[in-house]
Image (spheres, grey):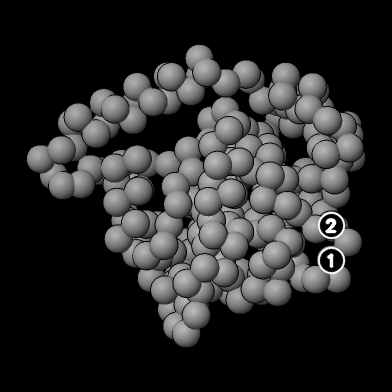
Amino acid sequence: MKKIALINETSQASKNQMIYNSLLKVAGKHGHYVMNFGTYGADDKTQLTYVEAGLLTAILINTKCADFVVTGCGTGEGAMLAANSFPNVLCGHIVDPSDAYMFMQINDGNAVSFPFAKGFGWGAELNLEYCFNELFEHESGNGYPKDRVIPEQRNKKILDEIKKVTHNDMLSIVKNIDKEFLMHTISGENFKKLFTDNCDDSELSNYIKSLL
């Protein structure tokens, strides 16, 4: 079972419940647990920018509060870039089911970002469900095409090691990042309960809890 978190930034808040329902429908079918971190709606007290969505993604992944994060913004690009700027996050940009399948099989990441405005028209919820199915139905990291399995798995390990060198550790980041920005990111109405119920017992988790 994977713990899957949903985060969408403020411009797409009106779609949060629809996205959550689609994710829950598919991920629940495959035995996964889904958490909704918002932004929940236009009147939500905590309105997350795509940069805050990236930071929140990193906090959830690095504390093991979530094993996988589904996020997004208008184009999906900003949330992807923000998430990938942090350690231990490998976020793909997903538009259609083939993106979802190949990202999981080739790149074996732990987060995805969707365009929740650009191209998000008639049948969008069906496309989301098909994408979620490709993300969560199969075991990840098996390679595609099959004759590329060994080099793809080797390259994924190389990328993971490079990210360890090119990124500061997450505890140092949250201690040095702008405090107002951090506190707003973790101020969601359900964050405290979802986080404390699911995070690991680590220095990073304990520091986040001390801020709450």
- For residue 159, which quarter of the picture? top left
**In the image, what residue occupies the spot 19% across and 29% down?**
151
**Residue 62: % across, % down:** 62, 33
**In the image, what residue occupies the spot 42% across and 25% down?**
160
Q: Secondary structure at mark 2?
A: loop
| Above or below for 14 versus 50 | below
| Most foreground residue, 182 or 75 | 75
Count the marks.
Answer: 2
The numbered mark at residue 44 is 1
Whole-Å distance between the Cαs marked 2 and 1?
5 Å
Does residue 162 appear anywhere in the picture? yes
- For residue 55, which quarter of the picture? top right
Farthest top residue?
165
**Residue 61: % across, % down:** 60, 38
Q: Secondary structure at mark 1?
A: loop
- Left/right of residue 108 with respect to residue 170 in the rendered view: left
The type of residue carrying mark 1 is Asp
Mark 2 burial class by Cα count in 10 Å: few <14, some 14-19, many 20+: some
| Above or below for 69 versus 19 | above
The numbered mark at residue 87 is none
Q: Which residue is mark 2?
A: 46
**Residue 89: % across, % down:** 53, 36
Does residue 193 appear anywhere in the picture? no
Quadrant the C terminus occupies: top right
- Left/right of residue 131 with respect to residue 118 in the rendered view: left
- For residue 182, which quarter of the picture? top right
**In the image, what residue occupies the spot 89% across and 37% down?**
180
Farthest left residue?
147
**Residue 15: % across, % down:** 65, 73
The type of residue carrying mark 2 is Thr
**In the image, what residue occupies the spot 57% across and 28% down?**
87
Callouts 2 and 1 close, C-beta under 8 Å: yes
